Image (cartoon, helix red, strand yellow):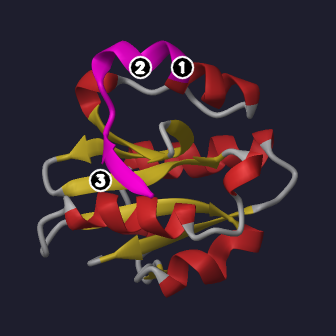
């Protein structure tokens, strides 16, 4: 399994995947997008969105059915977190059934939700209205 940065020419494919699962489209110029590949097949994607100086939001995790239960999501998350400075605050709006997974990757509960950037709170609110899974806001380096 190889994880690498997305190329601009892959944006149509990336956003088609997000469109199919009702995720917000990616913006190549404001995100670090990771692509997982195995045997030259795209296995999954994820992204780090630049929210504000010193603040990012990890999300957009998608793993193709054929590659699920193979550790692809964990490898994508690790790749993305490896691109964050150690003092970087990184939020994640996680589906409730995936909270334990994200916590195992280093995320924790938000202690001061009132300090979260408006963009992150807005995304959490939007997700609460769009998805039936329920969502939890998690953070690294709050």
Which mark lies nearer to you, 2 or 3? 2
Q: Which residue is mark 1?
A: 13
The percent coordinates of residue 80 (x first, y second) are: 32, 58
CA gap, disc 1 and disc 2: 5 Å
State the image coordinates of residue 62 (x, y, percent, origin top left). 61, 46
At 35% across and 13% down in the image, what residue appears?
9
**Around disc 3, counting alpha carbons within 10 Å, would you say few (fewer than 14), some (14 to 19), or many (20 or more)?**
many
Reply yes or no: does residue 8 show up in magenta: yes
Q: Residue at 77% across / 72% down in the picture?
A: 97
Q: Magenta residues?
A: 1-13
- Residue 13 at x, y percent in the picture: 54, 19
Q: Is residue 124 magenta?
A: no
Between the residue at mark 3 and the residue at mark 1, the CA separation in whole angstroms equals 23 Å
Please state, as top left, top right, bottom left or bottom right, where the N terminus lies in the image: bottom left
Q: Is residue 86 left or right of residue 25?
A: left
Please tell me how crowded label 1 is: few (under 14), some (14-19), or many (20+) other residues with Cα within 10 Å: few
Instruction: Using the image as rendered, state which of residue 118 and residue 46 is in the foreground.
Output: 46
The residue indicated by pointer 2 is 10
Q: Which callout, 2 or 3, points at the residue further toward the start of the chain?
A: 2
């Amino acid at each position: 399994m190889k994880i690498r940065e997305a190329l601009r020419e892959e944006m149509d494919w990336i956003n088609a995947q997000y469109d199919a699962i009702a995720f917000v489209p990616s913006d190549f110029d404001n995100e670090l997008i990771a692509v997982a590949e195995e045997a030259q097949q795209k296995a999954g994607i994820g992204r780090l969105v630049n929210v504000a100086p010193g603040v990012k939001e990890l999300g957009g995790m998608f793993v193709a059915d054929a590659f699920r239960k193979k550790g692809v999501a964990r490898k994508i998350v690790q790749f993305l977190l490896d691109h964050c400075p150690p003092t970087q605050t990184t939020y994640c709006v996680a589906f409730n059934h995936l909270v334990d997974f994200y916590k195992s990757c280093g995320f924790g509960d938000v202690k001061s939700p009132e300090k979260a950037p408006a963009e992150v709170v807005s995304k959490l609110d939007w997700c609460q209205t769009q998805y039936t899974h329920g969502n939890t806001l998690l953070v690294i380096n709050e």
